[in-house]
Amino acid sequence: MSTVVDQHCAAIREQGATISIQQLKTSFDAFVSELKKGGTFSVDITVIKQIVSILVNLPHKSKQLAEPQLIAHHFLTILRDCILVDQLCHRQSKDTAHDLLTDVSILFANVCRYINDTNLYLIKQLLIHKPLINELASCFEEMSISGKHLDDPRLLSSINFLLTAFQRFEKKEIETNECSLTTPLFLAVLKLVCSSYAVDMLTRLEHNFSQKLTEGQTLLLNTCPLYVYWFSGNRKPELALQVTRWLLRPFTAWMTSCHPDSIIYCSQELGDMMRHLAFTLVRPIEWENANGSSEEFYDDYCKRVSHWSSFLPVIIRHSSDEWSGMSIARFIVQDLYNFTLHPSVLNFMKSIPTLRSMLLKMTDVQQSETQLNAYRCLGKLMTEEDIKTMANPSKIAMIYVKFLMNDIDDPKTKERFYSLLQSLKNWVQHDQVKVHLINQKALPLLVRCVTETKFDPIKEQAAALEILLALSFNNDAASALRQNHHFMTHVRSVSNSIISDQSRLQRAAGGLLWKLEKETEAVAKPAILNSYQHDIMMSYSHSDKQLCYQIHEQLVKVGFRVWIDRDHMHGATMIAMADAIENSDIVIICMSDAYKQSVYCQSEAHYAFERRRCLIPLIMKPHYKPDGWLGIIASGKIYVDFAKIEFNLAYEKLKNEISQHRHQHTSQPTIKTKEKNHQDIPSTIPIPVEEASKSGEQYSIV
């Protein structure tokens, strides 16, 4: 055994976390020199084992090795080519050094744990190596075809760590065309996950949460789904639906067979497995470009939601104990939030009697991520009446402002900060929450998000501006924003910009300028009747576009002139929207949760209300009941429920409503001004829901 290698290994072991990068580089130089003695490589497995065993046990998961000058060192290339590739190539040989293969795989996984902007390119050069990818893909192909290697725990352990390295690499934002070499690996992993072997791994699980996983279960049910999630999320989101179709039902059957009380004994590895598998099984509902409809997963999703809901009382009972399982509690609440992104499942969740009260109790759990996810769920589930019955509704605003203040200047929480803003958009549909946010001084924080260049225009700036647009329906907030001249100048500049990838930001800026500067003047203009360019304008949420387009096509077929924004994702300008309303006799309001949550839909409905247009509300989702600002606007109107009755029957009811309106207004004068009546309707429509319901009974055509 080499004395030089012994000396350097001893030095690395002794200094541990305090060893400098330069010292490690010197040791790497010595290792390469020893391996090159004689002019050719003589891969001494014993020597490499000695070196790697020291490196893999460095403190902090070998963090020092992620420094660029070490990643670029030839020593790691030797480990890749002479150990990883060679040993995988001879994986069936009795001479395979399984322990060394595993240690080098762990080393690579540890290095990839610390990927950042400074070392990403070098790690790509090290990891995205065609021979390595081909050998690894070949292993997965053999497993998916015949189950080969699934009874070899040592090889499975090595493959598990290697795939973890690739998964951590995929997690970084990288350009699709730079990773075409990894596509064979992705397809091979996907094939294994969507195989009978993966289903068999699920069915072999014990009916409890305390069990230990085998190497095969860890690979097929934990690491592989997580890799598919990150790869497909970047490039091929529709392919992840294959995993959902294959594994959702057996996973749901296993999960619902486990008693809720056993969750307090959940092992770390089983918790990781459930979390990582759930990423792939639930998240496809967020992907706009996924071809498959998640409606096919509705029954299993509802079963999981019901079972998770039964876990919450158990978690709450143990939350005050020194329970080590709060990570599983965090996952369950996060998973419940992911289900709220599916409109049909969200409606089902609203029907669970105790869910909101349990989630409210989860907001008291002393774990910030759990609190945040509980509030994200509640933002989707709570109604205006729920908020009124809260003992302390100002706590919602207080928690969000606290998170905003804590995260706004912390680059490490950038993703959570954006998620926080997205979640807050759900809450600002409620007038009470708006008032509390303004009182808790949220406006200056949101203004910072819009005006400071450190925030991403496509993400944080756009979300913050949409929240401010919602808050501008409150007179106090609108006044404060108008008086901030620096902010208003910035918003005008954004609105006038022509940057193609910032359409969401520009739309929000245009909407806010309309609300703060132009709406009052527009409302005061004379309303011209019986000379409209359009018979009907359809105001709808993009989430409900399929049904809206179907209604639109039927109306056009029978000769109605219908204005509809078919590019609703990017959105027409507020001026174009106002022009469409002014030049339409009737405005159809397509009501749903998504409609009420959209500040643009609120702007359209509010302006149509102010302009005294004939409003015909349609119900787009089963069991939907409008409340808050939408309940006020729809008060006294007859609803046509497209979610409750057959389409053709509902459409005939809609045509009857249109005909009745036309008949009632045929004898009216052609010109009517609103100036006398305009001041009777405040811009924020501050009428309590109870009073609104008294002023005009709501009807539903069924």
Image (cartoon, rainbow, N blue to C red):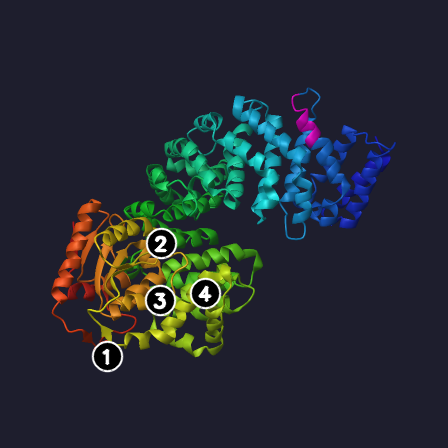
Q: Is residue 367 visible?
A: no
- Residue 285 shown left or right of residue 86 in the figure: left
In this view, 12 is above or below 636: above
Between 428 and 60, the one lying in front of the other is 428
Q: Start and end of the magenta stretch?
A: 85-92
Amino acid type assigned to the residue bearing label 3 in the image: Ala
Tell me the CA gap for discs 2 and 3.
17 Å
Q: Which mark is residue 506?
A: 4
For label 1, count other residues whose C-alpha is less than 10 Å away and answer few (under 14), some (14-19) or many (20+): few
Mark 1 and mark 2 in contact? Answer it, CB < 8 Å: no
Mark 1 and mark 3 in contact? Answer it, CB < 8 Å: no
In this view, 618 is above or below 210: below
Tell me the CA gap for discs 1 and 3.
22 Å
Q: Which mark is residue 542?
A: 2
- Label 1: which secondary element: loop
Tell me the CA gap for discs 4 and 3.
14 Å
Spot occupied by residue 338 in the image (x, y as percentages of width and height): 41, 47
The N terminus is located in which quarter?
top right
Tell which tag, 1 or 3, sits nearer the viewer.
3
Q: Quadrant of residue 36?
A: top right
Q: Quadrant of residue 243?
A: top left
Spot occupied by residue 571 in the image (x, y as percentages of width and height): 39, 60
Q: Earlier in the sequence, mark 1 or mark 2?
A: 2
For label 3, count other residues whose C-alpha is less than 10 Å away and answer few (under 14), some (14-19) or many (20+): few
Q: Quadrant of residue 159?
A: top right
In this view, 572 is above or below 320: below
Q: Which mark is residue 675?
A: 1
